[in-house]
Amino acid sequence: MSKPIALITGATSGIGEATARILSKDYRLIICGRRKDRLEKLRDELETDVQILSFDVREKEAVFNAIASLADEWQIIDTLINNAGNAHGLDLIQEGNTDDWDAMLDINVKGLLYVSKAILPKMVDRKKGHIVNISSIAGLEVYPRGNVYCASKHAVDALTKGMRMDLNEHGIKVTSIDPGLVETEFSEVRFKGDSKRAKQVYQNYTPLTAQDVAETIEFVLNRPAHVMIGDVLILPTDQASSTIVNKKSK
Ligand code: NDP
Ligand code: 8X3
Protein backbone atom coordinates (compact mmCIF):
# COMPACT_ATOMS: atom_id res chain seq x y z
CA MET A 1 0.00 0.00 0.00
CA SER A 2 1.36 3.47 -0.82
CA LYS A 3 2.29 5.81 1.99
CA PRO A 4 -0.22 8.47 3.11
CA ILE A 5 0.29 12.06 2.00
CA ALA A 6 1.12 14.99 4.29
CA LEU A 7 1.15 18.61 3.16
CA ILE A 8 3.38 20.90 5.23
CA THR A 9 3.30 24.68 4.87
CA GLY A 10 6.42 26.61 5.82
CA ALA A 11 8.71 23.66 5.07
CA THR A 12 11.67 25.82 4.01
CA SER A 13 13.02 26.27 7.54
CA GLY A 14 12.56 25.66 11.25
CA ILE A 15 9.67 23.55 12.51
CA GLY A 16 8.24 22.84 9.05
CA GLU A 17 11.54 21.61 7.63
CA ALA A 18 12.23 19.43 10.69
CA THR A 19 8.70 18.01 10.43
CA ALA A 20 9.23 17.18 6.76
CA ARG A 21 12.43 15.31 7.60
CA ILE A 22 10.76 13.26 10.34
CA LEU A 23 7.56 12.51 8.42
CA SER A 24 9.51 11.47 5.33
CA LYS A 25 9.90 8.02 6.94
CA ASP A 26 6.17 7.30 6.80
CA TYR A 27 4.60 9.80 4.39
CA ARG A 28 4.74 11.05 0.84
CA LEU A 29 5.13 14.80 1.20
CA ILE A 30 3.91 18.02 -0.35
CA ILE A 31 6.29 20.69 0.91
CA CYS A 32 5.36 24.36 0.62
CA GLY A 33 6.98 27.76 1.08
CA ARG A 34 8.01 30.79 -0.93
CA ARG A 35 11.72 29.94 -1.18
CA LYS A 36 11.67 27.43 -4.04
CA ASP A 37 15.43 26.83 -3.96
CA ARG A 38 15.14 25.54 -0.41
CA LEU A 39 12.18 23.34 -1.30
CA GLU A 40 14.15 21.81 -4.18
CA LYS A 41 17.15 21.16 -1.97
CA LEU A 42 14.97 19.55 0.70
CA ARG A 43 13.17 17.41 -1.90
CA ASP A 44 16.53 16.13 -3.14
CA GLU A 45 17.55 15.17 0.40
CA LEU A 46 14.35 13.37 1.41
CA GLU A 47 13.98 9.65 0.78
CA THR A 48 10.30 9.68 -0.10
CA ASP A 49 8.13 10.92 -2.97
CA VAL A 50 7.93 14.70 -2.72
CA GLN A 51 5.94 17.37 -4.53
CA ILE A 52 6.91 21.02 -4.25
CA LEU A 53 4.39 23.85 -4.13
CA SER A 54 5.84 27.34 -3.99
CA PHE A 55 3.30 30.02 -3.11
CA ASP A 56 2.64 32.85 -0.69
CA VAL A 57 -0.16 31.80 1.70
CA ARG A 58 -1.44 35.40 1.63
CA GLU A 59 -2.40 35.08 -2.04
CA LYS A 60 -5.76 33.37 -2.08
CA GLU A 61 -5.79 32.52 -5.79
CA ALA A 62 -2.20 31.26 -5.66
CA VAL A 63 -3.10 28.94 -2.78
CA PHE A 64 -6.10 27.43 -4.58
CA ASN A 65 -4.26 27.19 -7.92
CA ALA A 66 -1.28 25.48 -6.30
CA ILE A 67 -3.39 22.80 -4.62
CA ALA A 68 -5.49 22.34 -7.78
CA SER A 69 -2.31 21.87 -9.83
CA LEU A 70 -1.51 18.62 -7.99
CA ALA A 71 -2.11 15.38 -9.89
CA ASP A 72 -5.28 13.56 -8.78
CA GLU A 73 -3.45 11.01 -6.62
CA TRP A 74 -1.66 13.85 -4.77
CA GLN A 75 -4.95 15.59 -3.99
CA ILE A 76 -5.82 12.86 -1.48
CA ILE A 77 -4.14 14.59 1.43
CA ASP A 78 -4.32 12.68 4.72
CA THR A 79 -2.52 15.17 6.93
CA LEU A 80 -2.26 18.94 6.76
CA ILE A 81 0.36 20.69 8.87
CA ASN A 82 -0.60 24.39 8.98
CA ASN A 83 2.79 25.68 10.05
CA ALA A 84 3.63 28.72 7.86
CA GLY A 85 3.77 31.83 9.98
CA ASN A 86 5.95 34.32 11.76
CA ALA A 87 6.01 37.30 14.07
CA HIS A 88 6.83 40.64 12.49
CA GLY A 89 8.12 43.22 14.96
CA LEU A 90 7.88 43.48 18.75
CA ASP A 91 6.48 46.97 19.14
CA LEU A 92 4.19 48.65 21.61
CA ILE A 93 0.69 48.75 20.16
CA GLN A 94 0.77 52.56 19.89
CA GLU A 95 3.99 52.34 17.88
CA GLY A 96 3.05 49.32 15.76
CA ASN A 97 3.84 49.13 12.07
CA THR A 98 0.66 48.50 10.08
CA ASP A 99 2.56 46.48 7.45
CA ASP A 100 3.69 44.15 10.24
CA TRP A 101 0.10 43.86 11.47
CA ASP A 102 -1.11 43.02 7.95
CA ALA A 103 1.64 40.42 7.51
CA MET A 104 0.83 38.61 10.77
CA LEU A 105 -2.91 38.56 10.28
CA ASP A 106 -2.72 37.75 6.57
CA ILE A 107 -0.15 34.95 6.94
CA ASN A 108 -0.85 33.41 10.34
CA VAL A 109 -4.64 33.59 10.17
CA LYS A 110 -5.94 34.10 6.64
CA GLY A 111 -3.17 32.01 5.05
CA LEU A 112 -4.02 29.11 7.37
CA LEU A 113 -7.68 29.49 6.41
CA TYR A 114 -7.01 29.53 2.66
CA VAL A 115 -4.84 26.41 2.76
CA SER A 116 -7.37 24.61 4.96
CA LYS A 117 -10.25 25.60 2.66
CA ALA A 118 -8.36 24.23 -0.35
CA ILE A 119 -7.79 20.85 1.30
CA LEU A 120 -10.76 20.24 3.59
CA PRO A 121 -13.49 19.33 1.07
CA LYS A 122 -11.68 16.13 0.04
CA MET A 123 -11.06 15.21 3.69
CA VAL A 124 -14.78 15.69 4.34
CA ASP A 125 -15.68 13.55 1.29
CA ARG A 126 -13.39 10.77 2.51
CA LYS A 127 -14.41 11.23 6.18
CA LYS A 128 -10.74 11.03 7.04
CA GLY A 129 -7.92 13.40 7.77
CA HIS A 130 -5.84 15.17 10.39
CA ILE A 131 -5.17 18.89 10.59
CA VAL A 132 -2.34 20.06 12.82
CA ASN A 133 -2.30 23.80 13.41
CA ILE A 134 0.96 25.24 14.70
CA SER A 135 -0.21 27.86 17.17
CA SER A 136 2.01 29.05 20.04
CA ILE A 137 2.11 29.80 23.73
CA ALA A 138 1.21 33.23 22.28
CA GLY A 139 -2.15 31.71 21.38
CA LEU A 140 -2.81 30.97 25.04
CA GLU A 141 -1.19 33.97 26.75
CA VAL A 142 -0.55 37.60 25.87
CA TYR A 143 2.79 39.23 26.63
CA PRO A 144 3.92 42.87 26.50
CA ARG A 145 4.60 44.02 22.91
CA GLY A 146 3.19 40.70 21.63
CA ASN A 147 -0.17 42.38 20.84
CA VAL A 148 -0.90 41.51 17.19
CA TYR A 149 1.21 38.34 17.03
CA CYS A 150 -0.62 37.08 20.14
CA ALA A 151 -3.94 38.09 18.56
CA SER A 152 -3.07 36.12 15.43
CA LYS A 153 -2.22 33.01 17.44
CA HIS A 154 -5.32 33.41 19.64
CA ALA A 155 -7.22 33.39 16.34
CA VAL A 156 -5.46 30.15 15.38
CA ASP A 157 -6.52 28.70 18.75
CA ALA A 158 -10.14 29.71 18.08
CA LEU A 159 -9.99 28.28 14.55
CA THR A 160 -8.60 24.99 15.85
CA LYS A 161 -11.52 24.68 18.26
CA GLY A 162 -14.01 25.74 15.60
CA MET A 163 -12.60 23.29 13.05
CA ARG A 164 -12.78 20.49 15.59
CA MET A 165 -16.48 21.20 16.16
CA ASP A 166 -17.45 21.58 12.51
CA LEU A 167 -15.44 18.57 11.38
CA ASN A 168 -16.48 16.32 14.26
CA GLU A 169 -19.19 14.49 12.33
CA HIS A 170 -16.73 13.81 9.51
CA GLY A 171 -14.19 11.99 11.64
CA ILE A 172 -11.42 14.50 11.00
CA LYS A 173 -8.87 15.07 13.77
CA VAL A 174 -7.76 18.61 14.59
CA THR A 175 -4.76 19.28 16.83
CA SER A 176 -3.11 22.44 18.09
CA ILE A 177 0.62 22.45 18.83
CA ASP A 178 1.57 25.39 21.05
CA PRO A 179 5.33 25.76 21.35
CA GLY A 180 7.18 28.16 23.62
CA LEU A 181 10.60 29.43 22.59
CA VAL A 182 12.06 27.46 19.68
CA GLU A 183 15.36 28.46 18.08
CA THR A 184 14.64 28.80 14.35
CA GLU A 185 14.64 31.69 11.87
CA PHE A 186 11.60 33.03 13.76
CA SER A 187 13.44 35.82 15.60
CA GLU A 188 15.47 36.73 12.49
CA VAL A 189 12.15 37.41 10.79
CA ARG A 190 10.63 39.15 13.82
CA PHE A 191 13.63 41.50 14.04
CA LYS A 192 13.92 41.93 10.26
CA GLY A 193 17.33 40.36 9.82
CA ASP A 194 18.95 41.83 12.97
CA SER A 195 20.89 38.63 13.76
CA LYS A 196 22.44 39.97 16.95
CA ARG A 197 19.05 40.78 18.45
CA ALA A 198 17.64 37.48 17.21
CA LYS A 199 20.45 35.47 18.83
CA GLN A 200 19.90 37.21 22.16
CA VAL A 201 16.41 35.70 22.38
CA TYR A 202 17.97 32.25 22.81
CA GLN A 203 20.92 33.09 25.05
CA ASN A 204 21.59 31.97 28.64
CA TYR A 205 19.05 29.13 28.67
CA THR A 206 18.25 26.11 26.52
CA PRO A 207 15.44 26.77 24.01
CA LEU A 208 13.50 24.08 22.17
CA THR A 209 14.79 22.93 18.81
CA ALA A 210 12.65 22.52 15.70
CA GLN A 211 13.35 18.79 16.06
CA ASP A 212 11.70 18.77 19.53
CA VAL A 213 8.50 20.17 18.05
CA ALA A 214 8.64 17.90 15.00
CA GLU A 215 8.93 14.83 17.26
CA THR A 216 5.83 16.00 19.12
CA ILE A 217 3.94 16.36 15.84
CA GLU A 218 5.04 12.85 14.86
CA PHE A 219 3.76 11.51 18.20
CA VAL A 220 0.40 13.23 17.73
CA LEU A 221 0.01 11.81 14.22
CA ASN A 222 0.88 8.28 15.33
CA ARG A 223 -1.93 7.86 17.86
CA PRO A 224 -4.51 5.15 17.12
CA ALA A 225 -7.52 6.10 14.97
CA HIS A 226 -9.80 6.57 18.00
CA VAL A 227 -7.40 8.97 19.79
CA MET A 228 -7.20 12.69 18.98
CA ILE A 229 -4.67 14.81 20.83
CA GLY A 230 -6.45 18.18 21.05
CA ASP A 231 -3.80 20.55 22.27
CA VAL A 232 -0.11 20.29 23.18
CA LEU A 233 1.74 23.07 25.02
CA ILE A 234 5.45 22.32 24.60
CA LEU A 235 7.98 24.45 26.47
CA PRO A 236 11.69 24.49 27.15
CA THR A 237 12.28 23.29 30.70
CA ASP A 238 13.68 26.77 31.36
CA GLN A 239 10.39 28.45 30.38
CA ALA A 240 7.42 28.73 32.77
CA SER A 241 5.29 31.22 30.81
CA SER A 242 5.66 33.73 27.98
CA THR A 243 7.46 36.11 30.31
CA ILE A 244 9.18 33.79 32.80
CA VAL A 245 12.35 32.22 31.44
CA ASN A 246 15.17 31.06 33.71
CA LYS A 247 18.07 32.83 32.06
CA LYS A 248 20.46 31.82 34.82
CA SER A 249 20.41 28.19 33.76
CA LYS A 250 23.41 28.42 31.42
P1 NDP B 1 10.76 30.00 10.58
O1 NDP B 1 10.90 31.44 10.29
O2 NDP B 1 12.00 29.17 10.65
O3 NDP B 1 9.78 29.31 9.52
C1 NDP B 1 8.63 29.96 9.05
C2 NDP B 1 8.13 29.24 7.81
O4 NDP B 1 6.92 29.88 7.37
C3 NDP B 1 9.12 29.30 6.64
O5 NDP B 1 9.20 28.05 6.03
C4 NDP B 1 8.50 30.32 5.71
O6 NDP B 1 8.77 29.98 4.36
C5 NDP B 1 7.00 30.13 5.99
N1 NDP B 1 6.28 31.35 5.64
C6 NDP B 1 6.36 32.57 6.23
N2 NDP B 1 5.61 33.45 5.59
C7 NDP B 1 5.04 32.79 4.55
C8 NDP B 1 4.18 33.19 3.50
N3 NDP B 1 3.73 34.46 3.37
N4 NDP B 1 3.78 32.26 2.59
C9 NDP B 1 4.22 30.99 2.69
N5 NDP B 1 5.04 30.55 3.65
C10 NDP B 1 5.46 31.46 4.56
O7 NDP B 1 9.96 29.90 11.94
P2 NDP B 1 9.40 28.67 12.81
O8 NDP B 1 9.76 27.38 12.21
O9 NDP B 1 9.76 28.94 14.20
O10 NDP B 1 7.83 28.95 12.67
C11 NDP B 1 6.90 27.97 12.23
C12 NDP B 1 5.59 28.20 12.97
O11 NDP B 1 5.81 27.99 14.36
C13 NDP B 1 5.02 29.60 12.83
O12 NDP B 1 3.62 29.50 12.67
C14 NDP B 1 5.36 30.24 14.17
O13 NDP B 1 4.45 31.26 14.51
C15 NDP B 1 5.24 29.05 15.09
N6 NDP B 1 5.91 29.15 16.37
C16 NDP B 1 7.25 29.41 16.45
C17 NDP B 1 7.87 29.51 17.69
C18 NDP B 1 9.30 29.85 17.85
O14 NDP B 1 9.71 30.24 18.97
N7 NDP B 1 10.14 29.70 16.84
C19 NDP B 1 7.11 29.26 18.92
C20 NDP B 1 5.71 29.03 18.72
C21 NDP B 1 5.14 28.94 17.50
P3 NDP B 1 9.20 31.02 3.20
O15 NDP B 1 9.85 32.19 3.87
O16 NDP B 1 10.13 30.23 2.34
O17 NDP B 1 7.92 31.35 2.52
C1 8X3 C 1 6.66 32.16 19.28
C2 8X3 C 1 6.98 32.17 20.74
O1 8X3 C 1 7.10 33.65 22.81
O2 8X3 C 1 8.06 34.53 20.76
O3 8X3 C 1 5.32 31.94 19.06
O4 8X3 C 1 5.68 34.40 21.03
S1 8X3 C 1 6.95 33.77 21.35
Image: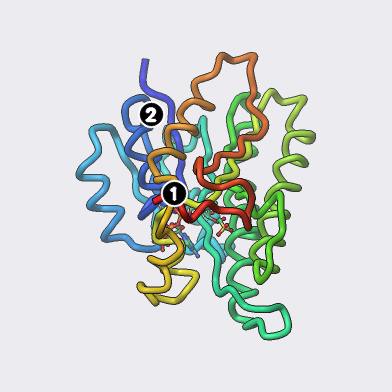
* 70 to the left or right of 176: left
Pick the front one: 107 or 199: 199
Secondary element under disc 1, as helix, strand or loop, is loop
Residue 45 visible to an observer of this rendering: yes
Q: Quadrant of the N terminus?
A: top left
**Compared to 167, does 60 lie above or below?**
below
Image x and y of residue 165, in percent: 79, 34
In primary-sequence order, the first of circles 1 and 2 is: 2
Q: Residue at x 42, y 58 (%)?
A: 202
Q: Residue at x 64, y 23 (%)?
A: 228
Q: Amino acid at mark 1?
A: Ser
- Of the numbered discs in the image, which one, if any, rests on residue 90? none
What residue would you read off at disc 1? 249
Q: Residue at x 64, y 74 (%)?
A: 101
Q: Residues within 10 Å of mark 1 (few under 14, many from 20)?
A: few
Q: Where on the picture, by quarter, is residue 104?
A: bottom right
Q: Residues within 10 Å of mark 2 (few under 14, many from 20)?
A: many
Pick the front one: 59 or 214: 214
